[in-house]
Image: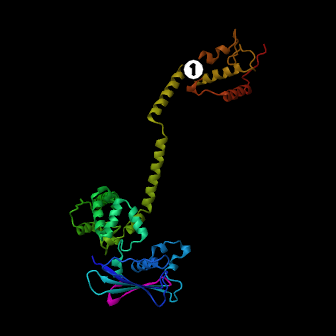
Amino acid sequence: MSGWYLQKVSIEGFRGINNEGAPLVIKLKPDCVNSISAPNGVGKTSIFDAVVYAITGRIPKLDELPAAEKGSSYYLNRFHAGGVGTITLTLVPAGGGAEVDVTVRRDAGGGRTVAASTGADGNAILADLNREFVLLDGKTFQDFIDLAPQKRGRSFAGLLGLKRYSALRQGFASLTNTRAFNNHFGVATKEAKQNTATVSLKRAQANIREAFTALVDDEYDPAEAETSMLAKAHSALSGIELLKPLCEGRTFEEIDPTSCVNAAKAAEGGEARAELAKILRDEARWSEALRAAPSEEDAKRLVELADARDAALKLTQGDLFRQLYSLSEIIIADDSWVDKCVCPTCDRSGAGSLRPCSPQARGLSGRGDSFGQSGPRMDQKRLESARRAGTIRTATR
């Protein structure tokens, strides 16, 4: 790793250093440990800030001030008429060689320029100097002390110039942790996407096989050349009279599927289409009728009820007599029929009331569910009809 020794610092118009026209020059001994001591307020921090800005291009404590405090306005000395701060670092290569002056200037608008003597690349030299612990301020040193042992060891590796090696070692350590590796690179998500893509691919292959077989009427062979399969598909489409004009002069890829579908739809119109629509309507109507029809069990029950009705009618003198008995019962039960011992049907008198001997009591009427029992309204209608016909006579005796 290359290195540089700081031999001299020249500062003018930056931070608390004004000395317009007479830069502050500090000479250092590259082969010794150098220290700067002075009373408070004479510019020790400004010297450090100037070196920090020259190497890194910023002063963190100013950039981190609230916007209302305008930290960028504190970079330059406000009493310097030139409005430009100049910092020159004189550096000597650690491996020997000629010294290099790297000059950094900042104008009132915050613009920064870097120049170097002897044709050297000033930005490259500053980037080489911008490493951990090259500039160790009080806060950074305190953070180093407060770090956990593991993190402090990593920071110390940076101090020794081994930061990249330390980062590489941590990377290899992470790779040995399968779970951490999978989480970092989202292996589970990628595997899920791969599985989904595999399923989609298999489904597409099945669809291609099915469509090819249906179109060409031949088995699909994955080993067959693509050009041969396309030729077969084109020949099959061209053989359909309806689609032939859409295939002539075109390769299989150039045939428009939408145009083929529209042509098929257009051909489905006319009389054939109307006949198909009628058949579909008839089918729907018959299907609805089948759904509404009684089930086989219901049909058997209806037959049983009809047989029971016929058997019950045979036990009587017929439906006409049933109606006669029913009407007689209604007349006898009516209050207008005074003498309950007289039969309204035959006009004969009995020893007692005929009500207990009504057709219902004798089981002659057969009025039940099998014969459609009449309700009160129907009985009243029959009574009124009998009165109008003169059937009902009031017994006076």
Using the rendered view, name the quadrant where residue 91 is placed.
bottom left
Residue at 26% x, 81% y is: 95
Residue 98 in the image: above or below residue 163: below
Q: How is the image coloured?
A: rainbow
Residue 129 in the image: above or below residue 300: below
Residue 317 in the image: above or below residue 70: above
Residue at 36% x, 82% y is: 28
Image location of residue 54, percent across then percent down: 41, 80
Total numbered labels:
1
Using the rendered view, name the quadrant where residue 23 is placed.
bottom left
Image location of residue 375, percent across then percent down: 65, 28
Magenta stretch encompasses residue 118: yes
Q: On the rendered structure, is 317 left or right of 284?
A: right
**Residue type (three-letter) at the residue carrying disc 1:** Gln
Image location of residue 109, percent across then percent down: 50, 84
Q: Secondary structure at mark 1?
A: loop
Residue at 72% x, 27% y is: 384
Q: On the rendered structure, is 246 left or right of 83?
A: left
- Name the foreground residue: 247 vs 78: 78
Q: On the rendered structure, is 333 left or right of 261?
A: right
Image location of residue 105, percent across then percent down: 44, 85
Magenta stretch encompasses residue 291: no
Residue 44 in the image: above or below residue 391: below
The answer to whether residue 191 of the structure is visible from this angle is: no
Q: Mark 1 packing: few (<14 Cα in 10 Å), some, or many (20+)? A: few
Using the rendered view, name the quadrant where residue 173 is placed.
bottom left
Q: Quadrant of the N terminus?
A: bottom left
Give the residues in magenta: 108-122
Badge 1 is on which residue?
A: 317
